Amino acid sequence: MADPGSGEQAGEDAQEALTCDFCGEPAPVVRRVALDRGYERLQTPHPVRYACSRCSEDKEQRRLGLRRG
C-alpha cells in the first residue's frame, strides 16, 4: 500500500488500488483525520483506518453531531 504521506493516495501509483476501511469499496483517494479541535488520534491507541470521500464526510458529520449514526 502507498505511504499515505507521500501523495500516492491520490492515485499516482496505479499498480496499488486503495480501499476504504469503512465501506470496503475501492477509492482513488482515501484520507484520515487525526487532529481537529477536541479530536486527537495521533497518540490515542487505536487501529488506523482510511476513508473514501463519502465515508470521510459521513464520519465527520457524525463526529460533529450533525448526523446520527
Image (cartoon, rainbow, N blue to C red):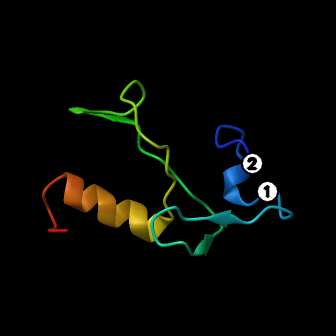
Q: Which mark is residue 56?
A: none
Q: Report whether 49 appears left or right of 61.
A: right
Frontmost of labels 1 and 2 is: 2
Q: Quadrant of residue 43?
A: top left
Q: Residue at x 74, y 48 (%)?
A: 2
Q: Name the residue furthest bottom.
A: 25
Q: Report whether 10 appears left or right of 23.
A: right
* Amino acid marked by disc 2: Ala
Label 2 belongs to which residue? 2
Q: Residues within 10 Å of mark 2 (few under 14, many from 20)?
A: some
Label 1 secondary element: loop
Residue 23 in the image: above or below residue 3: below
In primary-sequence order, the first of circles 1 and 2 is 2
User: In which quadrant will I find the C terminus?
Assistant: bottom left
Q: In the rendered picture of this protein, how many numbered marks are placed on residues? A: 2
Residue 63 in the image: above or below residue 45: below
Q: Residue 32 appears at what percent x and percent y?
A: 47, 47
Label 1 belongs to which residue? 12
Q: Residue 23 appears at what percent x and percent y?
A: 47, 72
Tell me whether the residue at label 1 lies in contact with that at label 2, contact meaning CB atoms closer than 8 angstroms.
yes
Q: Quadrant of residue 16?
A: bottom right
Q: Residue 47 appears at what percent x and percent y?
A: 46, 43
Gap in angstroms between the C-alphas marked 1 and 2: 9 Å
Q: Residue 25 appears at what percent x and percent y?
A: 57, 75
Q: Residue at x 49, y 44 (%)?
A: 48
Q: Residue at x 24, y 61 (%)?
A: 61
* Amino acid marked by disc 1: Glu
Q: Report whether 7 appears left or right of 43.
A: right
Label 2 secondary element: loop
Q: Residue at x 41, y 38 (%)?
A: 46
